[in-house]
Image: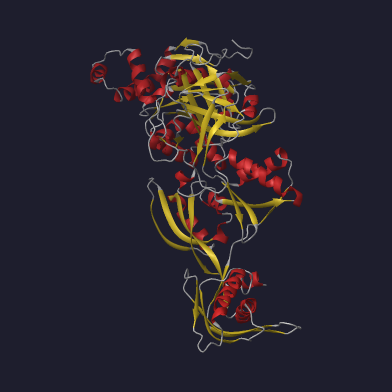
Amino acid sequence: MSRNGAPVFTAPRSPSQIRNVVLVGPQGTGKSALLEQLTTGQLGHVKAAEEASTGMGVASTVHEATGTVVTIVDTPGRPDFVGDVRAGLRAADAVVFVVAAGSGIDEATRMLWRECDAVGVPRLVAVTQLELARADYDQVVSDCRRIFGDAVPLAVPVLEDQQLVGVVDLLDEIVLDADGATRPLTDDEAAEVAGRRQTVVEAIIEESDDETLLERYLSGEELDLGDLRTTLGAAITSAKFFPIVPVNPPTGAGVPRLLDLIVWAFPAPDQAWLPLVTTPDGKNLVEVVVDPAQPLVAEVVRTTTDPYVGRLSLVRIFSGILTTGDRVHVSGHLERVVGHQVAGHPGHDEDDERVGQISSPLPGGAEPRDSAIAGELVLVTKLAAAETADTLSSGDRPALVEPWLLPEPLLPLALRAAASKDEDKLGSALQRLLGEDVTLRLEHNPETHQVVLWTLGPAQMEDVLTQLTERFHLEVETEPVRTSLRETFVRPVKVQGRLVKQSGGHGQYAVVHLDIEPLGRGAGFEFVDKVVGGSVPRQFIPSVEKGLRTQLGEGVLAGYPCVDVRVTLVDGKAHSVDSSDMAFQSAAGLALREAANESTVSLLEPVDAVEITISDDYVGAVMADLRGRRAQVHGTEPAGTEGHTVVRAEVPQHELARYPIDLRSVSHGSGSFTREFVRYDYLPAAIAREVIG
């Protein structure tokens, strides 16, 4: 035993000796305390490992009875960090949903359960905070069965003076006290839980492949406990049965039984679901077997920077052996997952990345290792070229693991260095953050001249600002995100552009007569030459077109590019000596500016097609909110998830700047949305006048 009471860590010898589990649930449910109790048996020992590893909270322990290495990943509970939650799901082979009694099951938890259900990930529910006055275990069980489906309690709490002092194991019919001691049920306790045990046994029988089990049960035969446990374990592993267990992380009550359940019922890596693996070009599948004897395939789940060891990566090994000092292939191609180039995350392949020090994430810190085998979750230092979601593989068989489901960042933050001398430093810091967190996007807008960082929500935004200040020692300023507008002519105009200058020597002389006509949205720019009689020499016709294109790009009224216009050159004048290419370019630009005023030119704003998925309860509130955003609602339809509706609308981009925050508020956390640019449309006159002014 170690000093803190946890078993001494021994590296696993095969994938069958490994369990990788992720804790998910809202903030405040007790996940971090549960991580500590599962890995140390007491509180106050995981903080160092959390800070020194990935910021997600990760620690390994050894199950004393079996020698199984159990690695627990604790994910953030705030919705802005759903990217870390999904990274944790990739790192693990099974999920513990932590539900606080009395708090209900929020929409984010329901959505995550559905995601796990879609791929058949084994799950169980750990119920916390049963000591609270409003807590009702039976109500939590009822909610879980209604929302999650085949969720069945395997234990019930033992409460004394509103404190959870132990749990009753319904299958073994024993009481486990908070200190881990066991005792048989009293007669009163046995009578009280008899009906609950019958429900558990019948649920297990329903999942059994042994048809005689039901017959024996109905005939009154006392079923063998070993048979029931074997059937139950198989059902949990195959994600057909979802246990509910009560735990009290602060005292540890129920936690030893939860750890036992993780070890005997959750799958080892060689029994678990594996992600899709291809060659780096994405053209051929790569067969992956969770076997140390096979070629290496591993994935960087999270990247951060430790003040003492530098760059630190949490790596999940799917196949082969990862050895300190080895040279590996690094491959990262997020664009193949999302279907387009991802700003700040270009595709890359590196052939000669050196693996730094490998270590196991233990509660008190990290323990160095020479190597790690398929199925393990380990920390690796100094992977210079590998970012979060990148694949590490053997140089003689490069591979690419398909990244996990990536949420789209939809909340923009425009920022700049407070001091001009720090601009390069800010750029470098942002690139570091992007390499660590694949949910961030970086945009350098050439029209608004802003650096825009796209985030998942205000908490992630605040976290970025904190890191820039405290970690990179940068003073930054934020500002409202400016929208890239356009200008367009709204009625035909006839105009003359005249440039006549004489200042000694060669002067400048050019006159052009233009007909300007508006075109439909998206038509672009058309130039028509209708000059007859050589009033504008042929060599200067391209000069006129070039001058028009330059001026349109710079704007004619408010400084925004002018689009969707046809300009016809109908006449002009030239001088045999003073006319030149530049003179006609300038005359063309002067003509456009002369023609532009508030009666002839209007501003256009970008409009996005928005698809919002919300709970049926909040459709009315969302529709009312959209009306206040100048949206055009195109309709609603039932979503693929029962009880949810999809709303389709077109909304000006300016009105979407804070929409991730506002939608979360209006829909009580039940809403999500996507957006895609569709066109430019007229900006209302009142707003346009403010912009022009």
| Closer to us: 301 or 211 | 301
Measured as percent of width and height from the top left, residue 423 is found at 71, 49
Count of labels in the image: 0
Q: Is residue 568 above or below residue 268?
A: below
Q: Quadrant of the N terminus?
A: top right
Q: Along the horizontal axis of the image, is 336 left or right of 461?
A: left
Residue 551 in the image: above or below residue 112: below
Front residue (pair 528, 289): 528
| Image coords of residue 66 (percent x, y) | 47, 12
The part of the image, by quadrant, that contains residue 550 is bottom right
Can the viewer see residue 419?
no
Q: How is the image coloured?
A: secondary structure
Position of 212 relative to 510 (above/below): above
Q: Quadrant of the C terminus?
A: bottom right
From the top left corner, tell me how far across and down residue 627 is, in percent: 51, 63
Question: Residue drawn 52% across and 58% down?
Answer: 625
Q: Position of residue 132 (x, y in %)?
A: 56, 30
Nearer-the-camera pick, 473 or 261: 473
Q: Is residue 584 something that shows in the picture?
A: yes
From the viewer's perspective, is residue 584 above or below residue 614? below
Q: Residue furthest bottom?
A: 533
